[in-house]
Amino acid sequence: MKKTLHFLLYALFILATLAISIMLAKAWNNFHDMKGKVSTLSEELQNKKNECLGLHQEVYNLKNNPHEVEKVAREVLKLVKENETIYTYPAKKKKNKER
């Protein structure tokens, strides 16, 4: 009877150890997956912060630099000064050099 009890306790201990090991392996894999996601998201966040800083600088320049306003008015809105003539030339076509 004592041997059977020891055997059952030993088997129960092995099963519990095996179950805990499986749960720890899953948790470890999840941890590494999340660590990779955090790294990717941190990099993406830094890129967005840099983009935001650039946009803030652009807004500041547009508010405080008349030359920047003129540049945007000319390039984006195609505005011209009074009595100014703009000449545009068609873009040159690239030759296709396939043989």
Image (cartoon, rainbow, N blue to C red):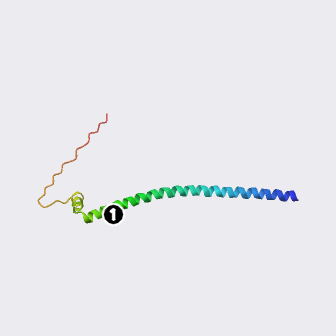
Q: Looking at the image, which residue sits at the far front?
A: 64
Q: Which quarter of the rendered picture does the C terminus lie within?
A: top left
Q: Looking at the image, which residue sits at the far top?
A: 99
Q: Residue at x 11, y 59 (%)?
A: 83
Counting every numbered tag in the picture gives 1
Q: Which quarter of the rendered picture does the N terminus lie within?
A: bottom right
Residue 73: x, y in percent? 22, 61
In the image, 18: left or right of 57? right
Q: Quadrant of residue 53?
A: bottom left
Q: Quadrant of residue 21?
A: bottom right
How many neighbours does mark 1 have within 10 angstroms: few (below 14), some (14-19), or many (20 or more)? Answer: few
In the image, 46: left or right of 86? right
Residue 77: x, y in percent? 23, 60
Q: Secondary structure at mark 1?
A: helix
Q: Residue at x 71, y 55 (%)?
A: 18
Q: Which residue is mark 1?
A: 56
